[in-house]
Image (spheres, rainbow, N blue to C red):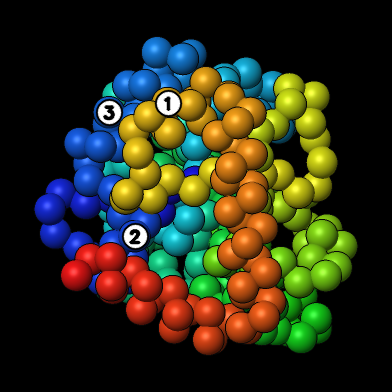
Amino acid sequence: MYHALSRGHALPGQDPHYTLDETVFRGQLQRIGRAGGACSVRDWLHDGERRPVLVTFDDGHASNHEIAFPALVEHGMRADFFVNPANVGTPGFATWAQLREMSDAGMSIQSHGYDHTYFTELAAPDLRDRLHAARVCIEDGVGAAVTLLAPPGGRMPPGLAGIARQCGYRHIVSSRPGRLAASQRGSILPRLAVTAPLDPRRFDAWVDGGIGPILREQLRYGSLSLAKQLLGDSRYERARMLVLAGRRD
């Protein structure tokens, strides 16, 4: 799971913790290529594509079109790009024309919700309306089916899978760490978050599918999930920003 990429300067809407330099990203694509390449979750689920790594991007930053898209094409790989219709075309985010270009080239454009509001902050009727609107808006914008949903911030309220199905989604692509079995087709799929401070050796271990490194990510995710429940979304985000700011200092 990627977010934004950079060429030494940040665009509006980019979170530095989740923003990788282009050279780092291209190096990771080379590593993935040596392991057999990557495809999108959509192609793996619905088109029978068989690659050892699945690549996704959240938020629809402008860098997804400017940097990630050409790099993926050069390496013969495809990815899913989860976007918020409310942000498309605003400063720092890809436009509908850019997303259509990516879709026409084989990239998968999918739903990150209507805007970036956490699903845990929405009542069920409002969530249902927004998920339906997001799917229809993206399908109209790019001219391709939307079947996958990635919750913003990984926040998944109880009953989300059922609501998503009612709105036309087939699978939820979560932020829960894990690896996929070749036969796995559950409604909620795992991902591993690639961040700026990620150690290259840990990335290599993920690509190799090592159980130990992924188990450590699962334990860390469990601790963070508990903190989110105890603090609530707003207080957790404030605490997170203070911690990250302290690390940069």
- Residue 89 in view in this figure: no
Q: Which residue is mark 2?
A: 17
Q: Who's the residue at 75% across and 54% down the image?
A: 169
Which quadrant of the structure image shows residue 12?
bottom left
Amino acid at the residue labelled 2: His
Q: Who's the residue at 73% across and 22% down the image?
A: 182
Judge whether 190 appears above or below 129 on screen. above
In terms of secondary structure, where does tag 2 sit? Answer: helix
What is the x, y in percent for residue 111?
A: 59, 58
Query: In the visual, does 208 lie left or right of 19?
Result: right
Labels 3, 2: front one: 2
Amino acid at the residue labelled 3: Gly
Amino acid at the residue labelled 1: Asp
What is the x, y in percent for residue 26?
A: 27, 31
Mark carried by residue 27:
3
Q: Which residue is mark 1?
A: 204
What is the x, y in percent for residue 174?
A: 65, 53
- Residue 230 in view in this figure: yes
Along the line of sight, the residue nearer the viewer: 236 or 100: 236
